[in-house]
Every structure is written in structure tokens, then in C-alpha cells.
Amino acid sequence: MITFVPASEPHLQLSSILEELHDEVYVYDADTLNLVYANKTARIRCDWATSEVVNKNICDTSGMFDTEGFHRHVEPLRSGMTDAVTIETIHEKGLVEITTRMVSSFEGKAVFVSVLRDREHRRKLEQARAQAFSEIVHDLRTPLTSIMGALKLIDSGTMGDLPPQAQNLLQIINRNADNLLNIVGDILDLQKYTTHRSDADEELEDLELVALTKEAVAAHLGYCAVHNVNINLTATPDHAWIRGIPLRLHQMLANLLSNAIKNSPKDSTVGVEMRSNGDTWQIRISNAGPGIPEHLRDRIFQNYVQHSGSKDSKVKGTGLGLAICKKIIKTHAGEIGFSCDTGKRTVFFVDIPKLDTPPS
């Protein structure tokens, strides 16, 4: 255990350094939580005189202090499981990061030393950066949409017939423009969830998940035909009520279904199953094929992780689809995961909490 020595003559320089730190430093008894020391930055924030510190408790540092939560937080220090614990939390002054250690004082008593670092400025900078990035990407979507419209118009023959070589070139341009538009859309969706603003104007509502899943499956029948793959929806209950955001759940199912379809061998079947799973409704989407490589399995839900289950697949994604799925399901207090038997079937499943009282 580290020894904490009060600011006596040999340690005046150290004490002066602590006094001038921009971070707040609190030293307090590990049993009573009564303060032994608080540096100048801490005293200014708490509006305390130096003489007042020894009459204060760490709980007095904030009107939002959660004593029970604090004791749970520092339990690993008391038990010797770790040397330090860190938490980010909302304080009266905004976002803060607090690192706490348990040390031994000069008298041999156990004390906690907590260093509080203001993260509000960093959070605002990150928000401003994310907002600027989002606006730039959003501005890209408008001209891309216009380009796509013009290309579709030319491709339809409305502007006259094109020679075969030009027609082939147009198809390549069309495909790449469509990919660009998908990338921009995925980045915008991911940015919304990263900045926690995705559902600011989207409210949860009572939803019937069976109907929503059937709609998603029907919407992908054409995609199945393009890839020569069948799709089969089985084992659905009569009704499965949840609280959710229809647009986001459609987006999640579309990502999972399109992944399963495009990574399936020709003439195989993508299975879609819904069932009760305790307090949740579970949707399972399975497909045959080589599955997910071992080296990607622990990262498959991370940003920009790309995998094509079929070597012949010409459909390239952004590597954001599954990351977005995970963020969507988290906003619904659900879970997403997968199981994979190499060379057999891969199953992606989502669990969404059941509605406590289904609509009558």
C-alpha cells in the first residue's frame, strides 16, 4: 500500500504542487469518509476556506453524491482487487472523471485519494467535432442523391438509347454511386448513435413485432431473387408486442437480412424465426455458408469491420451495418449476438424486451 505523508517540511514542495494542480484532489478517511485534505482547485469548486476542509465529509462535495454507489465503486480497493478505480459521471459542473486510490497515511490509517478531472470541455469539443462531421456528410448526400436521380433517368432510356459500351459504363457508375450513397447513410446513422441524438425526435411506441418482421422479410424477396436465395419465415407467435421505434427496427432487420442473403450460397435458404425467450422476444436469422472467420468474431459488431462470407460476392458494405444494429438494439434495451459453425450455419439473434401489458 502506498504511504500518504502530510505536508510537513520535507514535503512542502509536493504540497505546493498539489495546491496548484488544475485537477481537484481530495484525501479522506477510508472508514468515515471525513476529509483530511482538499487542494485549492477543490476548495474553490466547493467554495470552502482552507480551515473548513477538516470539518467536511467527501459526501459534502456534491449535492448529487450517491453514498451507496460510492461504497460499491470503491469495494475493489477495499478488497485489494485493484489499485485504482475510475468513473465518468455527471456532476454539477458537468461531465467529470474521478480516479480513486486507497493509500496509507503517515499515521498508518487507510485513506482514499480521489482526483477529479473536468471532462466537460472535452465533451463539448467532441460534440462540436461530431456535429461538424455530421453536417459535412449530410451535405454530401444531397448532391449524391441528385447524381443518382440523373443516372437513373439516363439508364431508363428517357434521354435516348446508349451504345452498349456506354450502357456498361453507366451500370458501373450507377453501382458505385449507389454504394457511396449507402456509405454516407451508414456514417450518418452511426454518428447519430455515437452522439446520443438518434432518438431525440423519435419516440418509442407500442409495436407488434410479428407484423414488422413479416414486412421486413417481404421487402427482401426481390433481393433474394437477385442472389438466387430463398427465405423462409417460421415459428412466429400470433402476436409479439414490444416498445420500439419502427424505422430503426426496420433498419436493423434490413441490415441482418441483407447480410444473410448476400453471404448465402446460391439455392440455399435464409431462415427467419421468432420465439419467446423469457422476458424477451427473440428473432433469429440464419444462413448457410463459410460463416465468420475466427479472427473477426470478437470484433464483428465494431465499426468498419467488413466481412463477406462468400468469395464470389460482389456486394461490398461499409463495415458499419452490424455496429449500427448493435446501437439500435441497445436503444431498445435489448441484446444482439450470433453463433457460428464454420462451414455450416451462422445465426444472428436479437432479443427485445416484451411489453409488460400488451394493448387490448
Image (cartoon, grey):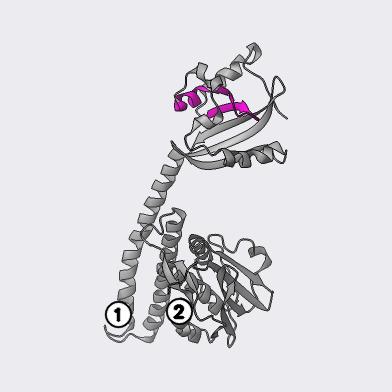
User: What residue would you read off at disc 1?
Assistant: 153
Residue 2 percent location from the top left of the image? 70, 28
Report the label total.
2
Residue 88 falls within the magenta-colored stretch: no
Residue type (three-letter) at the residue carrying disc 1: Leu
Q: Nearer the viewer, residue 315 or 349?
A: 349
Which residues lie in the magenta part? 24-46
Q: Of helix, strand and loop, which one carries label 1?
A: helix
Vertical position of residue 160 compared to residue 10: above or below: below
Q: Nearer the viewer, mark 1 or mark 2?
A: 2
- Residue 30 sits in quarter: top right
Give the position of the N terminus as an image quadrant: top right
Give the position of the C terminus as an image quadrant: bottom left
Disc 1: CA contacts within 10 A as few (<14), some (14-19) or many (>=20): few
- Residue 264 sits in quarter: bottom right
Q: Nearer the viewer, residue 44 or 121?
A: 44
Residue type (three-letter) at the residue carrying disc 2: Ala
Residue 28 falls within the magenta-colored stretch: yes
Give the side of residue 262 with respect to residue 133, left or right. right
Mark with earlier residue (1, 2):
1
- At a point 38% along the width and 83% down the height, the residue shown is 167
Would you say residue 313 is visible in this rendering?
Answer: no
Vertical position of residue 41 compared to residue 233: above or below: above
Residue 34 percent location from the top left of the image? 59, 26
The numbered mark at residue 211 is 2
